Structure formats: C-alpha cells, structure tokens
Image (tube, rainbow, N blue to C red):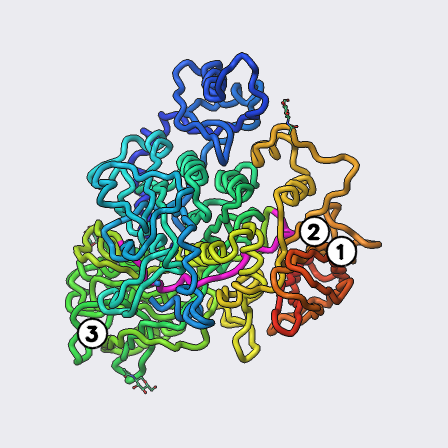
Amino acid sequence: MRRGSAQRLRLLLLILCCSSAVAAKKPTYIVHMAKSRMPPSFAEHRHWYDASLRSVSGSAEVLYFYDTVAHGFSARLTPAEARALARRYGVLSVEPETRYELHTTRTPEFLGLDRGGGFVTSSDSDGDVVVGVLDTGVWPERKSFDDAGFGPVPASWKGGCEEGKDFVPAAACNRKLVGARSFYRGYEASMGPMDESKEARSPRDNDGHGTHTSTTVAGSAVPDASLLGYAAGTARGMSSRARVAVYKVCWVGGCFSSDILAGMDKAVEDGCGVLSLSLGGRVADYYRDGIAIGAFTAMEKGVFVSCSAGNAGPVPTSLSNVAPWITTVGAGTLDRDFPAYVVLGNGENYTGATLYGGDPLPSSPLELVYAGNVTNTTNGNLCMLGTLLPEKVAGKIVLCDRGINSRVQKGYVVSEAGGAGMVLANSAGNGEELVADAHLLPATGVGEKAGNAIRSYLFSDPSPTATIVFRGTKVGVRPSPVVAAFSSRGPNTITRAILKPDLIAPGVNILAGWTGAVGPTGLGMDARRTEFNVISGTSMSCPHVSGLAALLKGAHPEWSPAAIRSALMTTAYAAYPSGDSIIDAATGRAATPFDLGAGHVDPPRAMDPGLIYDLTVDDYLDFLCASNYTPFRIASLTKRSNFTCDATRTYAVSDLNYPSFAVAFPATTNDVVVGDATTVKHRRTLTNVGGPGTYKATVRAWAGTEAGGVKVAVEPSELSFTEVGERRGYTVRFSAAGQPSGTTGFGRLEWSDGEHVVASPLAFTWK
Ligand SMILES: *[C@@H]1O[C@H](CO)[C@@H](O)[C@H](O)[C@H]1NC(C)=O
Ligand SMILES: *[C@@H]1O[C@H](CO)[C@@H](O)[C@H](O)[C@H]1NC(C)=O
Ligand SMILES: *[C@@H]1O[C@H](CO)[C@@H](O)[C@H](O)[C@H]1NC(C)=O
Ligand SMILES: *[C@@H]1O[C@H](CO)[C@@H](O)[C@H](O)[C@H]1NC(C)=O
C-alpha cells in the first residue's frame, strides 16, 4: 500500500521503543507436522502435536493448531527448543514466524464492466461466492455493506461472525458481510498485549485498509460516493453480488504469519471461494513462506488466492508472493486524475495531483520557500516532524521533498510550523508518477521534473512566489493505464522460469470504503471522518482481481483457480488501441512483462477466453519435484507426508502449464534442453472452454522492446477443438545465441481462432 510510509514509521517507532521487551521474549515458530504419521497411541492430532511440544518445553503453549491449509501448530520457543523440536518424530519443519506488511468509483467503468451486455447484473451466480479478505478488519457501518436485495447466505457457508470489542455480530454481519473473525495470538505473543485504546481486539477495522480492500472486492453500489468531493460517482466493488468475509490478521504492529496462517486455515474451512491478501514481506522460498504454504492447500481445495505483488518498484526483482499457485497482482493507473497547478511568480505553471478538500489559497501569490532553507537540520528538505522553523515558514508555501516520512505527514509538519501551503516534489525513484493525497493543508504533489524546475526557480529568483490552483477531478486521462512506478517488478528470484507478476489491475488513486476510526490521511491529528477514501498501492489492485475472480467463479463454477487466472491473463491487454505498449510510469517507456506480466485485466474478455491453461495439484507436485524440493519441504507445502518424486522421471519447471513463458539462457539442468544450452523447450496444454474452432499460433514482438534475437518455434502451430473440455498439447522451442549477462528480451505468443485471442507474454533473460 502506498499510504505505507506512515504505517512503517509507526512500526519502526514501536520497535525502537520496545526492543528490550521484545528481545526478552521467545520468538514464535510455525511447526509443520506429518499428520498421517501420527503414532497410533494418540487419539487426536492435537494431542500428538501438544505432546511433541511438551517433550522440548515444559512451559510452551500452543498459539494455534492448524488443520486445513497447514498441518501443525505455532508456539513460542527458544531457538534451542526449536532445534530440538525439529529433530522429533513426525516434525517436518520448524520455521521462525515472519512479519508481513500491508502492501475505487471509476474502476468498474474503466474496466468495461458496464459494457458487453452487463454480465455483472445478468447473473446472480457470483452471489454464491464468498471472498475472504485477510486484512485489518472491517468497518461494517458502511453503505457498501448494504445487503438489500441479497438472497440468503449460501447454504455451504460455514463461517462465523465473532463478537469482540466494538463489534456486535447482529449489527455487523448480514447477507453481504457474511463473516468476520480476528487473529491476534501471534501478534500479542510477539509484541505484548495490544493497546485497546488504539485497536480493537475484534474484527473492527481501526486502520481503513481492510475496509478499503473488502469494499473494492465486493462493495454494494453506493451512489454519490466521493472523498471530499473528489472521484465523485457510484462506488461499487468488482463483484457487487459476491459476499465478503473478513479475517483480521493485521494490527498496528504488522501482520504475523502465525495469525495469517490461522486466518487462511479458517477461511478455507469456512467455505471461502476466493482469498484476497493485500500484504507481503521479504520474498522467501515457498516452503518457508506462510502465505505460499496456506495458498497451496487453498488452491487444492479450489480456492482462488490473489495477492499483491508489493510496492517495492521500480527496482527489478522486488516482488513478493511469487508462488505459481498464487495470482500475483501489480498496479496500474486509471484514466482519472486530480489535477492542481502550481503557478510560479515567473508565470510558469506545473501540473500536480491532490485530494485536498478545504478552502483554496488566496489568489494573490504567496512567498515560496524550500524546506531545506527553513530548517535547522540537514534532512530538513524532507519536512520531518519538528524540523521546520516557524519564523521562516509562517504564511508561506513550502517546497518539501519526498522520502522517509509519509507524504501527508509532511503536510502536517508544514501546517504545524504555520505554513500556508505545500508543494511536494517527487524524488528520482518516484519519477513523474503522481499519487494524490487528502492533505491537511492546501498542497499538491508534483513530478520529479517539475520539482527540479521549481527548485531552480527558488534558488535563482531573489523573491520567489507561488500559488496552487485546485482543479478537482478529471477523467479521460491518456495514456492509461500506465504501470505504477511503485508496483514491484520481476524477474522472479525464486523460480526464474515462472514469470511474475501475473498481471496488473487498477491500484493508483482508488476510491473505496473507509474506516470511521481515522481520517483519510490516517494521521492521528486528522479529525476528518469520511465514508470513502482514495488510496494507492498493489494492496488496491489485488482486491480488484479477487473480485473479478469471484465473477468468473460465479459464471464458471467448474473452473479451477488456474483456469480463472488463465482466463484473466490470456485476455489481458499489454498495448493501447494504437498498438503501442502500455507505458511504465517509472521510465516513460514501454513496460515489459517483468513490469506488468500478461498485461492489464480486461474482464469482459476474461468471461469468454476461448481456451485456458489448466493446472491440477499433480502438475504443481511435478513442479516441486522439478524444483528439487526435498520430501520434507514438499510435505510442509502440500501436507502430503508420503509423496515422493519418481526417480525414473525427468521433471521440468518449463513444463508447468503456466499461461506465460519465462526463459533463462543459458539453459540449466532444470530446463528441457534440445541439443546444446542454446535451445530450450517448453510444453503446454490448452483446454477448450469455448465453441468449436481452429486456433493458429502467431509470435509477435513486444512493441517498444528488443526480442534479443530469440527464435521461437511453435509445434504444432495449429490446434483444432470440437468439444468443450477437449485438450491439445503443443511445444515451443526458444533458440538464442549468447548475449551479455543481464540482457533481456520480450515477445508475445498468441493463439487465435479469429474471434478469441489467447495471448501469453514471453520474457527472456541471459545470465
Ligand atoms: C498554465 O500554463 C498554460 C500555458 O503553458 C496555460 O494555458 C494555463 O492557463 C496555465 N494555467 C494556470 C492555472 O495558470
Ligand atoms: C537554499 O538551499 C540550497 C541548497 O539546498 C542552496 O543552494 C541555497 O543557497 C539556499 N538558499 C538560501 C537563501 O539559503
Ligand atoms: C530546531 O528547531 C526546532 C523547531 O524550532 C526546535 O524544536 C529544535 O530544538 C531545533 N533544533 C536545533 C538543533 O536547534
Ligand atoms: C501414507 O502413509 C500412511 C502411513 O505411513 C498410510 O497409512 C497412508 O495410507 C499413506 N497414504 C498414501 C496416500 O499413500
């Protein structure tokens, strides 16, 4: 999430103030058990797990037992106890818990959900789908959770609505919000008892993030929605008929994997059909990544798992949540903007973006100062708390630079020092990307170039002045979408042969529901309360895809999670109608598959993809064998304690039936190599989900990029289908000469019957 810096700062402060207390505590471990190996002397798994724990520690208490998406438990242990436990019979792994961080009105129109015969309203079938949102909880008293016109909760739903502080189930849950639970044992075990004056030990959302993501997934239509007049229109979630269940796993101090796993365990048991996780951490191998472990079993049970790709872009290899059974979602912009002009005393003006909603500035220009010149500290240009000198700021407009503290806090700092307004300049890392904020004083963000121009005016003019003119909401912005600079980028560092992210969806300046506990800036000093808020991040793009998955699942209940992802990916668009590739905001140039995967979601086309790349659990098991996973690692991930890879078989990661292709040259032993290491073969199988037809393969260049001289041969290059469900295989040979290490190349493989285009991105790298 983009609002993240405020949250991170809060986390940081917490760690600093309490580090001695935390250090004295035992860390939490997640213990994966080979459930089927339970000795017959135990009547129940939990007794066995408990006895295993007792055998290494007299005092340790189980925090959670995991029964569904993981087999095992979590507990606080000393490192020595953890090592001893790892040697016990039936223990697959003992992994220290990790802490994760949290990483819309115009969206339905922008995505074309109102074109193509209005399939959104024509079918109520997504009303049978419950989307589980693992986040900061929910503020149920929002019109987005209105259940008017909803039929009874699906009979298969086994979830619950838990009572807790400020959370009364009878008032909170209904036929739209069908479940609400909270998980905090791991959080409190690590951080100590929570401060209930700041957060509720219940599903109540004290942050806003969870209310925003859950209403993006499936909020009911709310007319006349806006934030302080901005982004006005009807707000509704992607699947306005689907039901929502919230699992509060994120707290002021972060999201702990013992709690996340417990939330996923319950969500799958409750009967969620889709899970949405807008959170992530440092990327880790799948068998040590709690979300990947939970998502494997969710996938096996037919549950679609959508995760945010992270906000660590535009740096390469900055992705999180890259397991191939997870759908990894990056962020793009909408065609909507919130412009404000910075008009300088020299007559020049620069366009910025803002969600400031109060009184405008006087029309006469005000004195303009650079924060770095009105401070007594070296980092004063960043407008950190208490660093501006009031006598030099009062009544003036201050130019602050982005970085370290949150954008909205900088505005607060300027207003505390008596400033009249603020211009917030992007750093090089943010480029020209404008993320709008509901600032507490008249303020606007500007791009890096405008920031540099304003700074040089400031340094050269003897008496610089400026004013800021606010222009409200503008729609129809072109080009759109562009890949958000912050959206995390590939290549995938865990499995180079699997391309990630999978796709992008709207994640910049998204309007959706908000908590009543804090104002739109999330700052303690922001006394405003709004029903909606506009925020940005891959946290916002992930729930778009979760909601679309619910639509697809409703329309095609028989589709597997891989089939749903395939439909979304192969119909995504990577170019504008002009044929030019979607642009990357960070560079202003063509985005590549490492930035946007297959491209931007196109829901009406995803409803009728023609063909899909399906995947079963066995395919993923083959993938784990191809990845040379040990039996214990496979067992932790898959909960199969007696699965073994077939020693007589040759497994290849490149055979995983994925809707995209990532090829690393020179080939390694994990690839299917033809001849020398310059030719790599991938196998794929297409399944017909449309009418009869003959599809022909075409390989295209990726507009605006080099292909790196790779020859692509598809065999056969024509596939005919007559029946629904019919499967046809093909192979692709990628042949390339050597290139300098670090070279990349891109292309696109399309299968078309003249009506459908089933497209896959191709990405090549050289080591
Ligand atoms: C900004 O400058 C352009 C010309 O470069 C002009 O058309 C426009 O009116 C100016 N806007 C404001 C708010 O001064
Ligand atoms: C303001 O700061 C810049 C660099 O940070 C410096 O070059 C300039 O001389 C300063 N101006 C004044 C008036 O102090
Ligand atoms: C800098 O200015 C702030 C605000 O006036 C003040 O609180 C702080 O003590 C000053 N620091 C130094 C090192 O002078
Ligand atoms: C796995 O092993 C257990 C005991 O070792 C056995 O009871 C069970 O049938 C086996 N399961 C499979 C699927 O082979």
Q: Is residue 289 visible?
A: yes
Q: Is residue 541 visible?
A: no
Q: Which residues are magenta?
A: 495-514
Please name whichever residue, 619 or 724, is drawn nearer the observer in this view of the structure: 724
Mark 1, ligand 4, within 8 Å: the answer is: no
Q: Residue 524 location in percent, x, y?
A: 21, 50
Q: Is residue 571 above or below residue 198?
A: below
Residue at (19, 59) in percent of width and height: 389
Mark 3 sits on what residue? 367
> Circles 2 and 1: CB distance less than 8 Å?
yes
Q: Is residue 548 above or below residue 55?
A: below
Amino acid type shown at disc 2: Ser
In primary-sequence order, the first of circles 2 and 1 is: 2
Please name whichever residue, 390 or 341, is drawn nearer the observer in this view of the structure: 341
Q: Residue 126 location in percent, x, y?
A: 43, 55
Instruction: Specify whether 200 is left or right of 76.
Output: left
Q: Quadrant of residue 627?
A: top right
Mark 1 sits on what residue? 680
